[in-house]
């Protein structure tokens, strides 16, 4: 079971002081959160892509690569990468590059994005969102698995003899999660490819996402990737922790009740009706354990800990409390209840083992005698057309 934090990079005034972080401060603080998450033993830090104010994470690959250089073990991910407004060729190359920089400590979550004005900024139409996400991911999937791609589709110019560089580290693409806040199409897409499905699990009533998770599990089994219980599921969550329950509620109250999303809503009412976890470490543990009861065994739990103008000192304290007092207990309790045969979340190391067994991983070396790919031949000296047949990819 993987535990971690995610951030969407919003910039809001601190409702208790009126202070608003600059973009430079917010970016620096996001880096500090990633480093602290690594130091306290969390498994994942994920950054969500946005291109509209007041959000500041417009380039997750750049930020993740920097965090990779400052950390030792934590998995770097996104929450989400936009598969619609981004060119899949650029996604393939940017995230393969970060995968190399991070020595494999990378996966990513893909999503459509639901901010209407952003689409035309990139020459897109939100009404094409579902079709675009399906087509673009099909191309991304191929770009990471085929050295030479010929492709023609609706939403970008054709490709002829194209090779995305660099090739994925060890010939193994980053594992992909498909993130959703409401749509069955995303669950179907994740199931078709045998990828992970990440249910946002915030801003909604308790267990609102269970039908989507159940659909994904059923379709995962339908497509022959394994039993429904073996599907790879992640959940989001919103938490604020203090040593004492009342301190957590009173400290967090202004950040919640004065936020534009929640103005007019009493924090206690929201906590009773939704998966949000605000309270003592034990209360947070107890609430998260209900997620396992409601959704079944799952592989990844991420917590949003720095939104709504929260000062970085409080956000770092949240990371420390998760690492010291919440996650160790959750690991033990969830493992004790876990059904036999439920897989762990894929990592680069596990995917390399699944693909190659005891053989040496592929390390592509471009052929210096090939200056183009237009003939459709591989530009790599060590290309093996039968490699997928001999070492089938598990996911």
Image (cartoon, rainbow, N blue to C red):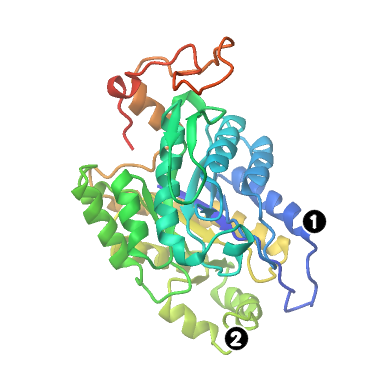
Q: Is residue 171 left or right of residue 208?
A: right
* Residue in front for this viewpoint, 269 or 193: 193
Who's the residue at 70% across and 50% down the image?
32
The correct choice, above or below, for 372 with respect to 175 in the image is above
At 43% across and 37% down in the image, what residue appears?
Answer: 151
Image location of residue 258, percent across then percent down = 65, 83
Task: Give the x, y percent position of residue 55.
Answer: 67, 64
Quarter holding the C terminus is top left
Residue at 22% from the left image edge and 44% from the top image edge: 340
On screen, 153 above or below 20? above
Q: Nearer the viewer, residue 204 or 344?
A: 204
Quadrant of res 316:
bottom right
Disc on res. 263: 2
**Front-lying residue, 376 or 23:** 376
- Residue position for label 1: 24
Q: Residues within 10 Å of mark 2 (few under 14, many from 20)?
A: few
């Amino acid at each position: 079971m993987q535990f971690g934090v995610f951030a969407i990079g919003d910039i809001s005034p601190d409702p208790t002081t009126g202070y608003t972080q600059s973009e430079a401060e917010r970016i620096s603080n996001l880096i500090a959160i990633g480093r602290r998450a690594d130091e306290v033993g969390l498994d994942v830090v994920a950054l969500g892509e946005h291109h509209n104010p007041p959000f500041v994470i417009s380039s997750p690959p750049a930020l993740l690569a920097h965090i990779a250089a400052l950390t030792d073990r934590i998995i770097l991910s996104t929450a989400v990468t936009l598969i619609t407004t981004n060119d899949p060729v650029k996604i393939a190359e940017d995230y393969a590059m970060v995968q190399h920089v991070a020595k494999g400590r990378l996966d990513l979550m893909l999503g459509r994005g639901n901010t209407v004005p952003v689409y035309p900024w990139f020459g897109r139409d939100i009404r094409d969102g579902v079709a675009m996400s399906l087509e673009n991911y099909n191309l991304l999937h191929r770009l990471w698995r085929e050295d030479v791609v010929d492709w023609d589709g609706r939403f970008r110019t054709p490709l002829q003899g194209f090779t995305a560089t660099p090739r994925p580290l060890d010939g193994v693409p980053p594992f992909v999660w498909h993130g959703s806040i409401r749509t069955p199409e995303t669950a179907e897409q994740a199931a078709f490819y045998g990828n992970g499905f990440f249910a946002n699990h915030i801003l909604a009533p308790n267990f609102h996402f269970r039908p989507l998770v159940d659909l994904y599990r059923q379709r995962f089994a339908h497509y022959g990737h394994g039993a429904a219980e073996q599907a790879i599921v992640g959940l989001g969550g919103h938490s604020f922790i203090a040593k004492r329950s009342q301190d957590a509620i009173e400290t967090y109250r202004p950040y919640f009740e004065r936020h534009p999303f929640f103005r007019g809503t009493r924090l206690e009412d929201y906590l009773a009706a939704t998966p949000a976890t605000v309270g003592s470490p034990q209360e947070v543990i107890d609430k998260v354990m209900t997620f396992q009861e409601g959704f079944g065994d799952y592989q990844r739990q991420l917590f949003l800990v720095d939104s709504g103008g929260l000062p970085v000192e409080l956000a770092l304290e949240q990371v420390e409390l998760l690492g010291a007092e919440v996650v160790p207990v959750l690991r033990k309790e969830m493992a004790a209840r876990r059904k036999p045969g439920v897989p762990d979340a894929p990592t680069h190391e596990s995917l390399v083992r699944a693909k190659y067994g005891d053989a040496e991983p592929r390390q592509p070396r471009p052929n210096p005698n090939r200056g183009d790919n237009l003939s459709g031949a591989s530009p790599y000296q060590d290309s093996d057309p039968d490699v997928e047949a001999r070492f089938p990819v598990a996911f």
